Image: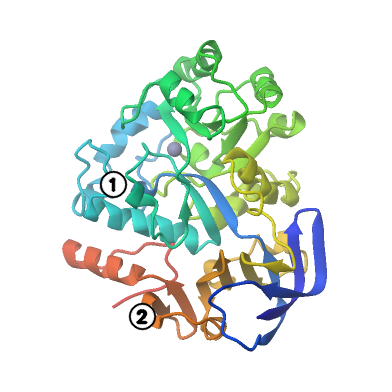
Amino acid sequence: MNLLVDSCVCNSEKILTNINIRINSPVLKQGGKHFDCKNSIAYPPFINSHDHLISNWYPKAGFGHTYTNVNAWVEDMKKTESFLERNKIWINDGSFDLTDPTAYQIVLLGIYKNLFSGCTIVQDHIPRQKPKYYQNTPIEVLKEYTQLHSLSLGNWWGGENAQTEYKKSGGKLPFIIHLGEGTDKTAAECFPKLKKLDLLKPNTLLIHGIALTRDQIKECAQAGASICWCPNSNFYLIGKTLDIDACLEYKVNVVLGTDSTMSGSVNLLEEFQFAHEKFPDIPLKQIFNMITINAVKALKLAPDCGTIEKETSNLLLIRKNKKDPFENLLSTKMEDIELLIHKGSPIYGNTNFLKQFDVDHNNYFFFRNDKFVLGHPEKIVASFNKQLGYKKPFPYLPFNIN
Ligand SMILES: [Zn+2]
């Protein structure tokens, strides 16, 4: 299959215009149909570096005020309408075994949140789950990592202590930890603690880092560590975010994450747009790197992720609303995604493209006359609606069901 596109963003520095893209896929039909996509732009699929898939309930869980430390929100959150509504479907028994069939339905919705925003890889910050959690998902949920919730709360949700978790990473897998999510003394103490434990390493991925000072950010850069920026969640919970200007000045490897919808953006497209709105001076290319090549480095992904070439088995094709491919992302909505391909497999997009693939249509859900998606998210929503007794909207799903 060939697609003639207006432009192809191979990476933020290499953009090919008026170019033919050839899709490599073992499930393509013979014949090699040619599509004229001159009103479309090709990108590498995006990577969301921080989410909690089980927590993508809606709306945000809060009481209209911010906190000096996230630890207070973790308790308060349990009294919010959003949390209590999710409890009607699934109650967290503290085991954090999310392969439980009901829990897994909620997790799957979180996976679809990412899929419909053009992500094919997501990092789910949760204790490592049983292998089946990571298998047969419509997009990739990162499975090779070690983690700690935070140095202030420890691994209350499962997993070992910080040093043991780091040791298990072998210095190679990403070691992921929330750090400095607040403005108080407890938040400020996290970084010195991390250093004392000798855990500021090239494979360390710090989430949030709101409390980090400029000097500490410089130390992160020198150590080769990565920091995940979740501005929407940070402003909502804490009223402040990471010193992103210092991060860019010292060339920290910054990645972007949504966090869950109980505190953060609806999806990664909205997070990209929010980051630009709040920090218009940051070149869009740099924010684009945070959801592509920087994430490949932080999450230790295969080198063919985060970039594409004109012959590719990964693709994110988006309708061209703006000529500049990065500005185009500022107005991109879920519906503007025309085709999403991961490892040769069509995941989401316009049905005219799906016709070129030799796949079983029973494995797809078709909606809005012209869209398809791999799997059956509509069945999950129908099941939740039945259990709740009313229609529950999820703003990250681009379809409605009766
Ligand atoms: Zn988080």
The residue pinned by badge 2 equals 362
The location of residue 54, given as percent across then percent down, is 34, 48
Secondary structure beneath dot 2 equals helix
Q: Is residue 129 visible?
A: yes
Residue 143 appears in which quarter of the rendering?
A: top left
Q: Nearer the viewer, residue 177 or 131?
A: 131
Residue drawn at (44%, 31%) of the image: 147
Q: Residue furthest top?
A: 196
The location of residue 104, given as percent across then percent down, is 29, 54
Q: Nearer the viewer, residue 60 or 5?
A: 5
Q: Relative to 203, is 388 on the left or the right?
A: left
Quadrant placement of the C terminus: bottom left
| Beta carbon at label 2 within 8 Å of ligand 1 | no
Dot 2 amino acid type:
Asn
The residue pinned by badge 1 equals 98
Using the image, determine if residue 391 lies above or below residue 367. Answer: above
The location of residue 63, given as percent across then percent down, is 34, 40
Q: Nearer the viewer, residue 275 or 288?
A: 288
Q: Which is more N-terminal, label 1 or label 2?
A: 1
Residue drawn at (39%, 51%) of the image: 134
Residue 52 appears in which quarter of the rendering?
A: top left
Using the image, determine if residue 281 lies above or below residue 181. Answer: below
Q: Is residue 264 visible?
A: no
